[in-house]
Structures are given as structure tokens and as C-alpha cells.
Amino acid sequence: MSEKLNQLKEILGEVSDLNHAGSVLSWDQQVNMPPGGGEARGQQLATLGKLSHEKSTSDKVGKLLDDLKQEFAGSDSDDAALVRVAARNFDKTMRVPSEFVSEQAVVTTAAFEAWVEAKKKSDFSIFHPHLEKVFDLARKYVSFFPPSDHLYDVLLDDYEPGMKTADVQAIFDKLRPQQVKLIRNIKSAKQVKDDFLHKKYAEKKVWDFSATIASKFGYDFSRGRQDKAAHPFETSFSVNDVRITNRYEPDNPLATLFSGMHESGHAMYEQGINPAYERTPLANGVSSAVHESQSRMWENLVGRSLPFWEHFFPELKKLFPTQLDGVSAKTFYKAINKVEPTFIRVNADEATYNLHIMLRLELEIAMIEGKVAIKDLPEIWNTKMQEYLGITPPDDAHGVLQDIHWSAGLIGYFPTYALGNLVSVQLWEKINKDIRDLDSQIHDGKFDELLAWLRKNIHVHGHKYDPQDLVKNVAGSKIDPSAYVRYLTKKYSDIYGL
Amino acid sequence: MSEKLNQLKEILGEVSDLNHAGSVLSWDQQVNMPPGGGEARGQQLATLGKLSHEKSTSDKVGKLLDDLKQEFAGSDSDDAALVRVAARNFDKTMRVPSEFVSEQAVVTTAAFEAWVEAKKKSDFSIFHPHLEKVFDLARKYVSFFPPSDHLYDVLLDDYEPGMKTADVQAIFDKLRPQQVKLIRNIKSAKQVKDDFLHKKYAEKKVWDFSATIASKFGYDFSRGRQDKAAHPFETSFSVNDVRITNRYEPDNPLATLFSGMHESGHAMYEQGINPAYERTPLANGVSSAVHESQSRMWENLVGRSLPFWEHFFPELKKLFPTQLDGVSAKTFYKAINKVEPTFIRVNADEATYNLHIMLRLELEIAMIEGKVAIKDLPEIWNTKMQEYLGITPPDDAHGVLQDIHWSAGLIGYFPTYALGNLVSVQLWEKINKDIRDLDSQIHDGKFDELLAWLRKNIHVHGHKYDPQDLVKNVAGSKIDPSAYVRYLTKKYSDIYGL
């Protein structure tokens, strides 16, 4: 093997170790850390981030990459992919001055604190000046890159490499009227009953049942673990140590089950990456949308399907005989798929979820373009909620202040949630062609063939391919909403007798 | 403040961050990590260690220290102490070639695995070749340093700065006959009853009671936490995040209580260090012996005292009325202080413990000097056990293979356990002069004055003073066994009616 490639791998290996060490520290911060530990932890994370940045952007790395790009030009080997991805990361990182990175850290730290307070008091004015700064910085960030078709392209590219704003808008423009129409039809149909979902369900039983499902899906607990945290998330420290968190909300006790499926979907992706990619930039999911396609597939396409509950409902009912007295698998299935416009994105059902995303994308684009004054944001938010979902948030906590993303400087991330939904169904149609009896396998509680398909076609490749190419190669077309519309229409026609 | 001092502090701050990040990763490895995570974790820890080493030994640090040593010569300020301790660490680290450090990591990793297997099979021959290498490396390590009175001085100095082998031998020579005599007297006295300690005690109740005691001592759970691990230990990530672990052994259920007191003693030391020392080499306990004096004080001088159990025994009895039926506080106190020669050091009582240490010191010195062939170690071990404690281990697992230390390359560490016992009582005599009613405070379950004394006289100083000076200044004399002998004699005369 090329001596230069070895040198590059050694440096990238250390960068990976530093980043993974940072991930362990962040995980600990959210799962275990006593309140006193916060200040020192922030400092430790800053130092790890700084050293990782210094190592990734050294002249030596730049020179190695220049030479290796030539050496591997035209090759489709793993090593060529590694060089390509590393060069892409290097180019992006080098464009951004380290003073900017520090400034952003300071601004988002303050913005996050302001957001927490603003949300608590439901007072946008507390967050407003910080959000101005966050968007100023986002525009400044864009200015470090060569001109693109749209300012927002630069931001989007960080989460969904190669995707263009115009593409996303075209996809959403096609999708929006279909989803709005569907919701209207559902609204005038006979509503489903779901009162039994909001009874008391004992936390430990729900928690253990969630772990059982994750384990049956194929999430490997010998290379992972599940802990309690304020928010469900997945994080990986290597392909052999991929952890998930979950929570229990007394008002919505069974949400734990679906969050668990969601996070285990993310985690199985990371556990399935080619171990040969360990300690290289290929050992990650390829993009936010593809990652989300995995979590949403297990949560929605598997976990909110009738065959799934035909298998698991008897077990759930054995755990909660009183709460589910007189409820059938079919009734339960309808209840967990109830469509109801809600204020909060993370609680949204499959029929309304993407509309929450479209609203956010429109606002982000308008703000980046400077076409909307940030002070007017709450009003615009509420107007759009009325337009898309027919409801108006009672306050900013249930409106413009609900999500953490902007306070953390994450602009360009939201669209990938909806794109992930679309990709999940595009893959699902292909999988159902390849595995003809998938429904009956799920009905029997068998997921090994499904997981093997995902492993082979998606997981194992890690970051080797471009995400748009990967989707096209596997699903047969680039990201497109028609499969999703077919899926929603069929599912809800059945549930609501449309 | 000196610009150079600022520069030094910045570098040492990053070194501290890297080392603390490593501590978080190690803690996670022992408390949470799924089995699959081991390989990557080893790599991550190696990278953090390497970067910390590179940063600590840069030419820049060397030059800064040279200049600052002159600037602060003769000062007793905190900054002068920082420069002195940092220069001492720098000098030690620079003497050891990084190839040696790598070689040692390889040797001890293999030695640890061999030790685990050897102990499991109780077969010294599996460990023997590795132990040869460990001691070869220890001798090589010594060769990097200027000649000292004794080869072992160099090893000892890493754990107990400034302490000499001859001093330890003199202390142990004075102590040994006294402890041997005491044990003989106890052996011929009427034995105490302790069968009730080995009944079944429910794990959760024991665990919670242990946490209650730690909390009442003054261990601050808002700046710490207690988790389960294979071995009890204390680790700190900052003065505001100091964690302890503990375990539950069904055969010895109440051992959890004493391990908890021990580790919380270590932890209160770290929690009490001057917060201004954060991210500097002063933010540590000053030496292994002084650290151990804190843990042993809370475990033995407080936790195995009659006043302590006069207060806590009623609570314990309320939790375990059946197990402790008919047992009085005094009977319980005698039982937990039962003297009985045992094979395993960590289970040893206060009267026999130091003899286990003396045996190890003699063997370590003989091996470093090359006066003992490592193959003969099991036999010599067993002979000495018979000589000191009057018992012969049934196998090597209960003899020469019991401790992890040698497999980890820790040579020179053992004596600090015994020295810690001595220091704890030297301090205790002084504390009892300063707090006249300490016994009755303990009898009332009050520990705040005791903790405040330790905070002020020991904890707050961190690594500022030389450990031998600190002990002398606070206790009035350097490390000396007479206080310990007085303590043992009085305690066991009472318990055994000698």
C-alpha cells in the first residue's frame, strides 16, 4: 500500500479517535454527568475539538491529499473513496477560518441558553437577538464558499452532500398538495379511537419491551446499550460500540416504543458499517437523509405496520391487560397511526410530519435570503401553521421556539428529516420486490432478512458512495416523493376507509 | 501575570483536558462499555495518551519551565508550586523515551491478559514469562534516572515523591514485630462472633445504605456519582465531577459499606481541592500514601469505630431486622473488626493488612535487585505468608496471583497502602487534639467538623506541597508507625480483652 496513504490513515485515525473521545464525553454529559461537571466538560470538549481541527487541517494532510488524489484518480476502490471523502472534508474545513469556528461556538452557546429560557417562558423576544446572530453567522459561513445556485445550497450540503435547494423545493412542491389533500380527506372521515394509548403504562415494563423490540430487530446489545436521557438519540464510538438513549413521558407512555425503534434504526446502520472502515471518514452514515431513512423505516414502515402488531400486540397486551382490555391488534394499529394536526413536529404522525419540515425550510430560506425580518418570525410561523395544518399555536413554545436546531446553529438540517421519510419508502418498495414475503416475515416477528438486505445494500458501504448515487443505485431513482404518496394513500385509505 | 506563565498554563490546561478525557473513557470502559467496544477504546486511549505526552514534552514547555523556574525561585506562591510540580513532571517524562512507553504498553497489555488467565486457572506458569518482562522493563526504567541510594527509590518516587526505600524499610522494620506480636496475642484470646455478617443481605438495601453513609460523610453527589463496577475505585474528571464505583459480593455483602466509605474518602479529597488549581498539575491528591490516608480514615477510623455504629447500627438493624436479630451495636462493632489472617490482601483486617504489604515490598525489592528468580516466586510467597501470618495459600490464585498491580507494571505502589494507614492515624491523633469531642460528634452522626478540618489542612492544598512536608507540617512528624501501633493496641485490647 502507498506509504502516503498509510500516513494519511494514521493521521485520520487519530482525528477519528479524538472525535470519538468527544462523543463519549458528550454522551456521558447527557446520560450520567452530575450537575457540577458541566463547566469542565465544556472545556474538555473544546480542547478535543481544537486538536481534532488542528490535526485535520495541517499542511501535511493537505499535501498528502493532493498527492493521493492524483494517485487514486478514476479508481472506485475503498481507498479511493477514503481519499475523496477526506479531501472533501479537508476542503470544507480549510475554507472556514478558525476564528469563525470559535465565534460560532460562543454565539451558539449563548443562543442555546437563551433558547432554553425563551422556550420555558414562551417568550420569543429573549431568543430573538441570538437568532439574528445565528443567521448572520450562517450567511458569513456561506460567504467562505464559492457561489452556488442558492445561498442555502452551502448549508444543505453539510448534511446532504450534493443535494441542491432547488431539488428539495421541487420535491416538496410535488409532495405538499398531495399531503394537504390527504389530511383534508382524513379530517372529514370517521375518526379513530386512541384513548387507551393515554392510560397509565408502567415505565419499567415499557422500557424493557422497547429493548426487546430493538433486540429482535437486530440491534446488537453486545455492541451497544440503551440509557435514559432527556432526548432520545444515537451515538457511536466505533462500529462495535453504538449506543442509543430513550425517555419515558408519562403523558405519552408508548412513545418510548417508537423512539426506541427509531434510534435502533439509526444504530443498526452504524453497527453494520464495514469494520475495515474503522478510524476513517468512511465509518459514518453517508448523509442525514439516508440515516433518517433507516430510523424511519424501522419506526414507521415496520413499527407502525399491521403485520408488526399482529405479532407483538399479544405480548404487549399480556404486559398491560387492563389498559388494553377489549382492544384488538387492528384497533391498536389504527390508534398508533391516528392522523391529527399537532403543534409539535416530533409528535407528528406520518401524514402531517413533512408539512412541519416544509414550513421550516421556507422560513430558513427566507431568513438566509434576508427576506424575512427575524422579529416577524413568530407571526409568519403561526400563519403558515394555519395554512398547512389548519391550526394556530397557542404560544411560541408550541410554535417557533419548539426546536433546538437553530439555537445550535443547525441551519440546513431540517429538510433531511422529510427526505429521509421519502427515501425510506423508496427503499421499502425495492425491498418488497426483493423479499416477496416480507409482510408475512414481519407478521412472524422475523427481521433477519430485512436487516441483511439493509446491511448489504446500505449499511456496509458507510460513507463510500455519494448519497444521491447510493439512493439511485439501490432504489432505482433519485430522491422522489411518489413512492411516499403511494404509501400514505394506501395506508390511510385502509385506516380511515377513504 | 507573567505572559510565560499564561502560556504554560494554557498548554498544561490542554494536557489536563486530554488526561481527563482519558479518565472519562476509562471510567466508561469499566462501568458502561459493551463488550464489543474494547478494541476501539484501547486505540482511543492510546491516542489521547500519545497527544498528552507530546504536548507535555514539547520543547516549548521545556523552555517555558526553564525561564519560569528562575522567575519563581524562592517563592511559595501557588504559581511557584505549579512551576515546581510541572518541572518535576517534565523532567521525569523527558527521561523516558517514547519507544519505552510504547514497549511498556505492549508488554503490560499482554501481561494483563496472561494474568487474568493465570489467576482463573491458578497457574503461575502462564504469568511467569510476562512477569519477567515486566521486571526487566522496571529495571530499564530505573536506568533512565540518575543513580539513587537504591534501585527501588526511582519506582517508589513515582507514587510517593521524596520517599526513600530505606525510610520505608526502617518504618516497616519497626512496625512488623509489633503487628506480629499483636496478632499472636489476639490468636490466643477469646474469638469474636461474626456469623451474622455472612447471612443474606439484599443488594439494593446495602447499596442505598452505602450511598447514604457517603452522603452523610460529605461526599457531594451533585459533583459526583456512584456506579457499579467489577472493582471499587475513585476517579475524577474535575474537582466538580469526582466519581466512585462499588460492587456487591453475595459472600461478603456488607463489604460494600466499607468499600463505599473508602472510595468516598478518596473522592472527598479530590472534591476538596482548591478550584483555582483546576486544569493544572496541582489539582490532584499529593501522593498515593496521603490519598490512601483519606480513604482509610473514613473506612477504618470512622467507619469501623464504635461511636459510628452506635449511631448507624439502629438504622442498619431497621433495614435488616432478621439478619441482625439479637445483635447489639457493640457486638456488630466487634464482628466488623474481627482479626483473622487471610490469604487475600483486600479482605484483610487492620491488624494484618500491613503484613501483606511488607511481604510484597520485600519481594519487589528482591526482584528488582535480581536476587530472586521469578520462577521461585510462588514458593517464596507461600513461605513468607507462613512466616508473617501463619497460613499457607491453597493455590497461586490465593497467593502470588491475587493482585492486578504487577500485570499493569505498577512496581513501587504497594508500600503506599501501608504508609497510608500510618498517615491516617498520625492525622487522627492531631485531629482529636483539635476537635476534642470528635468521638461524640461521630456518635451523633456529625462529620462536618472533621471534613472541614481535612479540607483545610489536606484537601484544599492539592499537590501544592511535598507530601512528606505536608504530613510533617500537619501531623507534627514525618511518617512514623508509633501512632498506628498505639491505635491498634488500644482498639484490639478493648475488642479482645487483651
Image (spheres, coloured by chain):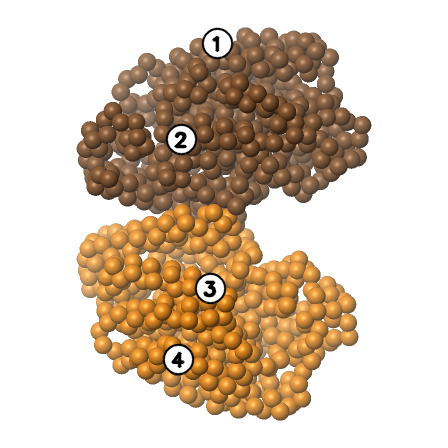
Chain colours: A orange, B brown
Q: Residues under labels 3 and 1: Cα distance? A: 65 Å
Q: Which residue is mark 4?
A: A376
Q: Which residue is mark 3?
A: A117
Name the residue rendered at 32%, 62% in the picture. A104
Badges 4 and 3, same chain: yes
- Relative placement, left or right, of B459 versus B449 is left
Q: Is residue A92 left or right of residue A246?
A: left
Which three-letter amino acid code belongs to the residue tagged 4?
A: Asp
Which residue bears the numbered disc 2?
A: B461
Q: Within 10 Å of the Cα at label 1, are there few (<14), some (14-19), or many (20+) other Cα atoms?
A: few
Name the quadrant containing residue B79. top left
Q: Say if A282 sits above or below B462 in the image.
A: below
Label 3 element class: helix
- Give the chain of mark 1: B
Q: Residue at x 32, y 26 (%)?
A: B141
Mark 3 crowd level (few <14, some 14–19, many ≥20, 10 Å Cα)? some
Q: Amino acid at mark 1?
A: Asp
Mark closer to the chain start, 2 or 1: 1
Q: Secondary structure at mark 1?
A: helix
Q: Are marks 2 and 1 in contact (CB under 8 Å)?
A: no
Quadrant where the N terminus of chain A is found in the figure: bottom left
- Give the residue type at disc 3: Glu
Which residue bears the numbered disc 1? B173
Which of A128 and B172 lies nearest the eye of the viewer?
A128
Packing grade of label 4 (10 A; few <14, some 14-19, many >=20) is few
Q: Percent from the top left, x then y, of residue A58?
A: 22, 54
